[in-house]
Image: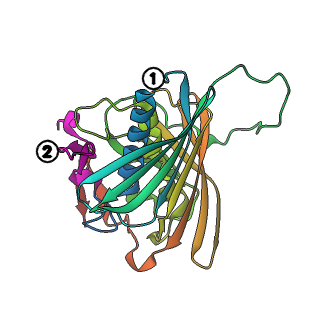
Amino acid sequence: MDLSTVSFFTLDPDQADDGEVLLPTPLACSSWSSDQVHGVAISGAFARAAEQALAALGRDDLRPARQSVDLFRPARMAPFHLSTEVVREGPRICLVDVTLRQEDEPVARASVLFLRTGEPASGTVWSPQEEHASHRPPSEDVAPPTDQPRVPFVHSDAGWTQRFGDHQNASRKSSWNSAVPVVAGETLTPFQAVAATADGTSLVTNWGTEGVQHINTDITLSLARLPRGVEVGLTAIDRVEHDGIAVGTAAVFDREGPIGEVVLTSIVNARRAIDFNRVEYDDDGTRHDS
């Protein structure tokens, strides 16, 4: 298996007059529909576009601190046209908006905030003193460090495994992910890795005894620092649901500890639930339905 060719998009060799065009690969296809791109790929593509906009400004003194994504139309397995706008650039901040269009219609958008770092404040502020065990990745014996894509490890009452069917239960969930490159032939950046992984918050907050019965409508990722590499973990820390609308919160961590949080809003989609008792994946993204 050649994982070096695995990616969510390729570049269209016949670029549009107004910029590059991304072509979704089969790995970008959502479990909700055979003609829909999942949020992991979309969020990663937004992070890449925002990083490119920042690089064009020559601002290597800023780092990503937040990405908010609105998924207001299904993104199809069709060409992606991404445009960026620098909303504000200052000495300590840069705000970039990114819009995804398909067939000249806006499909999704993101607001990406870059900030300049500084010396920590001198005062003492409250923070959690006891870190939950699931805020840490599986042991290196179970999940050796890698920069190659692989099937996520999931943790529930069943422990850490890559067999999704083991975790179709009502217990608290975590995941450990080695992110997929956004575009073929490009090196995945830590920001692209964590931004793409953030969409997986739906798995750790909305996955229950009947599978995933909610589809998320947005993703807000906030980071105190970037991950060290492209391996990123998520663990559910809160969930509230009323009348088919759910809000889930997950902690984001790497092998050194917590780095931020994700909050997402989702709506019930129970008639098209994703039943992971019937689905397994290979590291190259090949899906097996039983």
- Colour option used: rainbow
Helix, strand or loop for disc 1? loop
Taking the spot 57% from the left edge, 27% from the top edge, the residue there is: 256
Taking the spot 48% from the left edge, 50% from the top edge, the residue there is: 110
Helix, strand or loop for disc 2? loop
Taking the spot 23% from the left edge, 59% from the top edge, the residue there is: 78
Q: Magenta stretch containing residue 27, yes or no?
A: yes
**Farthest left residue?**
14
Q: Is residue 209 left or right of residue 73?
A: right
Question: Which mark is drawn over residue 115?
Answer: none
Residue range corresponding to the magenta coloring: 1-28
Q: Amino acid at mark 2?
A: Asp
Q: Position of residue 261 (x, y in %)?
A: 61, 45
Q: Position of residue 18 (x, y in %)?
A: 27, 45
On the question of residue 71 being in view, the answer is: yes
Q: Magenta stretch containing residue 67, yes or no?
A: no
Q: Quadrant of residue 188?
A: top left
**Farthest top residue?**
119
Mark 2: few/some/many CA within 10 Å (<14, 14-19, 20+): few
Q: Quadrant of residue 77?
A: bottom left
Which residue carries the number 1 mark? 58
Q: Is residue 29 left or right of residue 13?
A: right
Question: Which mark is drawn over residue 14?
Answer: 2
- Which quadrant, please, contains the C terminus? bottom left
Q: Position of residue 85 (x, y in %)?
A: 46, 44
**Farthest front residue?**
17
Q: Position of residue 143 (x, y in %)?
A: 41, 35
Mark 1: few/some/many CA within 10 Å (<14, 14-19, 20+): few
Query: Please, is residue 246 above or below residue 159 in the view?
Result: below
Q: Amino acid at mark 1?
A: Gly
| Of the pair 73 and 202, the residue shown nearer to us | 73
